Amino acid sequence: MQGNTLICGYLDVKISAKSRRGLTPWKAWQKQWCELKRLDNIENGVELKLKSSMEGSVLNCLLLPRSSTICRTESRTKQYAFGVFAMGRTQKPLLFLSGASESDAQDWIASIRKMLCVASYLPVGESNFHVSVVDNVHSRAAGLVGLHGVLGSNSQEIVISDPCTGDPRLCWYWHQFHQFHFQAPAHPVDDKRIIVMHTSG
């Protein structure tokens, strides 16, 4: 495993009442300074410290299991919310976080996923891209919640592969799509970074 890495910044945070980790649940979102640290531990991959400010004292400290699922979630007040969910049939939420934009949220999601992974990511060529599904009602209906990886294509298909092993996770044939377009950005930083793919059926 790689050495410890520290990533930090402000996020809106909401601790789930279903967390069952000895944390007092927050009914409302609170802006917190978040510090992510990669752990050299088989069971838990990331330590997340929550502070009121960069120089403030630690208010909460959570250990995120390597089996955690990280995906975008819906919120009535936070457009770019995402959650950390425990593995298992119930998929209990550990906590919810929200970025300032789609790009900000996806950058945090990608960082957490990479830290949780035991193996290192494979290098990506110029014609391949790291991608992540922006989870919504359509991705849930298709069973694609939390889908991420390396996108590549050839003359016949589009493939999303595991970022660590390179094994295909999902393949689509070109004829399964009838339209691609950029999503109109709500923030300038999201311009030409979100692609909407329309399937034929």
Image: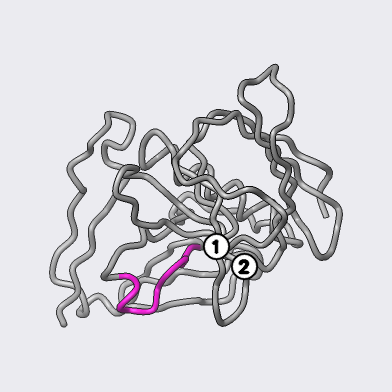
* Disc 1: which residue: 93
Instruction: Give the crowd class for mark 2: few <14, some 14-19, many >=20 residues within 10 Å.
Output: many
Which region of the structure is painted magenta? 139-148
Which residue lies at the image location 27% right of the left edge and 68% below the top edge?
Answer: 137
Which residue lies at the image location 13% right of the left edge and 71% below the top edge?
Answer: 178
Taking depth in this image into account, of 126 and 39 the one nearest to the observer is: 39
Does residue 189 lie above or below 128 as drawn? above
Q: Is residue 145 magenta?
A: yes
Residue type pointed to by label 1 = Pro
Which residue lies at the image location 39% right of the left edge and 57% below the top edge?
Answer: 73
As drawn, is 38 to the left or to the right of 71? Answer: right
Q: Magenta-highlighted stretch: main secondary structure?
A: loop
Does residue 91 lie above or below 197 as drawn? below
Q: Is label 2 in contact with label 1 (beta carbons under 8 Å)?
A: yes
As drawn, is 138 to the left or to the right of 168? Answer: left
Q: Residue 86, which numbered label?
A: 2
Q: CA distance from mark 2 to mark 1?
A: 6 Å
Q: Position of residue 152 (x, y in %)?
A: 43, 64
